[in-house]
Amino acid sequence: MNPLIQITSIFKILYELDNLEDKSLGERKKEQLLRRKLSGSNLGGRPKISTLKESLVIRLRNEGYSYRSIRSQTGIALSTIRRVILEGELT
């Protein structure tokens, strides 16, 4: 058998094995995500701050505190404080 044909055949087999592995990995990820959705588990993403802290941020802002003083009192990031306040104004 021609060595070039053998090498080509080996690469075709390796390519197909790689495709099969990618497909099975994708299927496993989809199954895990579906299991998490059905069980109500965490699906990933950033953790949310509690509604208690959100209400504290809004209360402190309504009392006239600055974003930075709210940050020093609560330990919440400025961007999160800004987002909570903006969402609070919309509702």
Image (tube, rainbow, N blue to C red):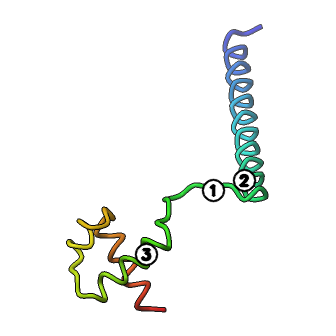
Residue 43's label in the rendered image is 1
Q: Is residue 59 rendered to the left or right of residue 67?
A: right
Say above or below: 40 vs 56. above
The 10 Å Cα crowd at callout 1, few under 14, some 14 to 19, many 20 or more, is: few
Say above or below: 3 vs 85. above
The 10 Å Cα crowd at callout 2, few under 14, some 14 to 19, many 20 or more, is: some
Q: Which of 4 and 51 is in front in this view?
A: 51
The three-letter code of the residue at mark 1 reads Leu
Whichever of callouts 3 and 1 sits on the residue coming sooner in the sequence is 1
The residue shown at (72%, 59%) is: 40
Whichever of callouts 3 and 2 sits on the residue coming sooner in the sequence is 2
State yes or no: discs 1 and 2 in contact (Cβ < 8 Å): yes
Say above or below: 55 vs 36. below
The three-letter code of the residue at mark 2 reads Arg
Q: Is residue 39 rendered to the left or right of residue 55?
A: right
Residue 56 is situated, as x and y percent measured from the top left of the image, at 38, 77
Q: Nearer the viewer, residue 46 or 26?
A: 46
Whichever of callouts 1 and 2 sits on the residue coming sooner in the sequence is 2
Q: What SS does tag 2 mark?
A: helix
Disc 1/disc 2 C-alpha distance (Å) = 7 Å
Residue 38 is situated, as x and y percent measured from the top left of the image, at 79, 58
The residue shown at (20%, 72%) is: 68
Q: What SS does tag 1 mark?
A: loop
Q: Mark 3 points at which residue?
A: 54
Q: Is residue 83 rendered to the left or right of residue 18?
A: left
Q: Mark 2 points at which residue?
A: 36
The residue shown at (75%, 34%) is: 20
Q: Nearer the viewer, residue 17 or 52?
A: 52
The three-letter code of the residue at mark 3 reads Glu
The residue shown at (38%, 84%) is: 86
Q: Is residue 69 rendered to the left or right of residue 37?
A: left
